Image: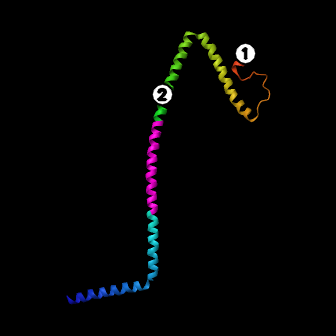
Amino acid sequence: MEEKEDEIEQQKDASTVFAKSLANQVNPNDVASMKVIQREMLSRFEKTNEMLINFNMLSSSRFNVTADEFQKHTAMLYDMKKDLDSVFKRIRVLKQRLGKTYPEAFSVCSDICSLSERLDDEEVPEARSSVAQPSSSTNGNRNKNDPKSITKDKT
C-alpha cells in the first residue's frame, strides 16, 4: 500500500514539476497583456450584442406596424376592386338596356365615343412630341385633335 502511495506522490510531484516548468516558459507580462486585450474584446462584444438586440427589437416592432398597415391597405384595395367591379357591371347592364331601348341613338353615341377614343390614343404620342417641340401651327383657336372641333367642322 505504501508503494502505491509513494507512486502517487511521485506522479503528483512529476506533474507539479512539469506545470511549474511550463509556467516558467511563459512570460507573465504577456499573459497579463492577453487578459487585458481579452477583457477589452469582451466589452466590445457585449456592447455590440446589446446594440444588435436593440436593433432587432426596433425592427420587430416596426415590422409588426408595417405588416398591420399593409394588411389594412390590402383589404382596402380588395374592397375597392369589388366596388369597381360592381360599378362596371352596372354600367354594362345600363349600356345593354340603352342599346335595346334606343338602338339608333346608342349606335351614334358609340360611334362618337370610339372616334373620341381613337383621337385620344393618337393624341398621346403627339403630346409627348409636343412637350419636346411645341407646335407652332395652331390654325386659329381650333385644335385638330379636339373631338368637338372635328364634329363642328363636319356639320
Which is the main secondary structure of the residues drawn in magenta?
Answer: helix
Query: Is residue 51 placed above or below 72 in the rendered structure?
Result: below
Q: Residue at x 71, y 31 (%)?
A: 127
Relative horizontal placement of residue 13, taking residue 82 as reference (left or right): left
Whether residue 87 is situated above or below residue 108 in the rendered picture: below
In this figure, which residue is indicated by the disc labeled 1?
152
- Image-quadrant location for residue 23: bottom left
Q: Quadrant of the N terminus?
A: bottom left
Left or right: where 126 falls relative to 23: right
Q: Please tell me which residue is depicted at 64% across the width and 16% down the height of the picture.
A: 111
Q: Which of the pair 2/17 is nearer the observer?
A: 17
* Residue 43, image quadrant: bottom left
Foreground pick, 126 / 5? 126
Relative height, residue 136 to residue 101 (above, below): below
Q: In front: 63, or 95? A: 63
In percent of width and height, residue 77 lies at: 49, 33
Q: What range of the chain is rendered magenta?
A: 47-73
Task: Work out which quarter of the rendered image holds the C terminus and state it.
Answer: top right
Q: Residues within 10 Å of mark 1 (few under 14, many from 20)?
A: few
Q: Amino acid at mark 2?
A: Lys
Q: Residue at x 44, y 68 (%)?
A: 42
Q: Residue at x 26, y 86 (%)?
A: 8
Q: Is residue 20 left or right of residue 48?
A: left
Q: Which disc number belongs to residue 52? A: none
Q: Which residue is mark 2?
A: 82
